[in-house]
Image (cartoon, rainbow, N blue to C red):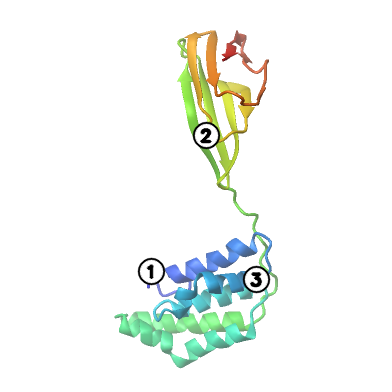
Amino acid sequence: MGVWGVNVKDSDSFADVYDGFFDIYNNGASSEYASSEVKESFSEYFKDYEDSNNSWFALAYAQWETKSLEPSVLEKVSSIIASGSDLKLWEELGASKEDLNNRKSVLEAFLKEISSERKTKKRRKKPKHDFRVNTLIELAAPDNQKVFTVTEEFSDGKYVHTSALMMWATGGGSVFYFTKEGAQVSAEWQSSKSLVVTVEKDIEFSKKDDSAFYCGDKVAVTYL
């Protein structure tokens, strides 16, 4: 049982179950669906002697915040607190008398809070999207005034496209892009004004002919 304080939220199992609930809920699912998924995903937590109490506390709090607290869940939490089973567990794990007294007060306040209906439902948060870039080429020009880069871009683990950019110190622009994950691409500067790019056969890509202009500097890009 990973615990770092006497507060109800101060445990790994509480955090995992609570965050798991809102990961699902924030994606548009109902609280009922989020609850059933969490119970299944973290079934070992709910069955584990040391993690079970905090798991039920987390589920109850998540349901309470979404104004969907099930009577059976409230009853389960009330039983845990009223029976003193959580304090017994803490005592078995070596908690001090001071910690036990503080935990008792925290649990009583927690039960009182979730026993009263929340005024407003917690708003769903827009899920954060994971954006990742895999750099295939990063090649500075001989004059060190610009850099040619080719990257594969991924959103939430899914490949989006491969993008080539010409970047100067104060800006830049897209040169071309295509959609073939893992494609072979290479480049070589012939001079500070000429770049040769080699790509696989049969790749269909969009080329932006005017994008290699910047601050009066034109770079000629040749595709083989």
The residue nearer to you, when weighing 52 against 178, is 178
* Disc 3, SS: helix
Q: Residue at x 58, y 80 (%)?
A: 113
Q: Tell me the quadrant of the picture where the C terminus can be found.
A: top right
Question: In this rendering, which labeled residue sits more in front, label 2 or label 3?
Answer: 2
Residue 104 x, y percent position in the rendering: 44, 84
Residue 63 x, y percent position in the rendering: 62, 74
Mark 1 crowdedness (10 Å alpha carbons): few <14, some 14-19, many ≥20: few
Distance CA(mark 2)–CA(mark 1): 44 Å
Residue 217 x, y percent position in the rendering: 59, 9
Confirm whether residue 10 shows in the render.
no
* Disc 1, SS: loop
Q: Tell me the quadrant of the picture where the N terminus can be found.
A: bottom left
Distance CA(mark 2)–CA(mark 3): 37 Å
The residue nearer to you, when weighing 73 against 5, is 73
Q: Are marks 1 and 3 in contact (CB under 8 Å)?
A: no
- Label drawn at residue 182: 2
The earlier-in-sequence mark between 2 and 1 is 1
Q: Residue at x 47, y 10 (%)?
A: 143
Disc 2 residue type (three-letter): Gly
Distance CA(mark 1)–CA(mark 3): 30 Å
Q: Which residue carries the number 3 mark?
A: 33
Q: Which residue carries the number 1 mark?
A: 4
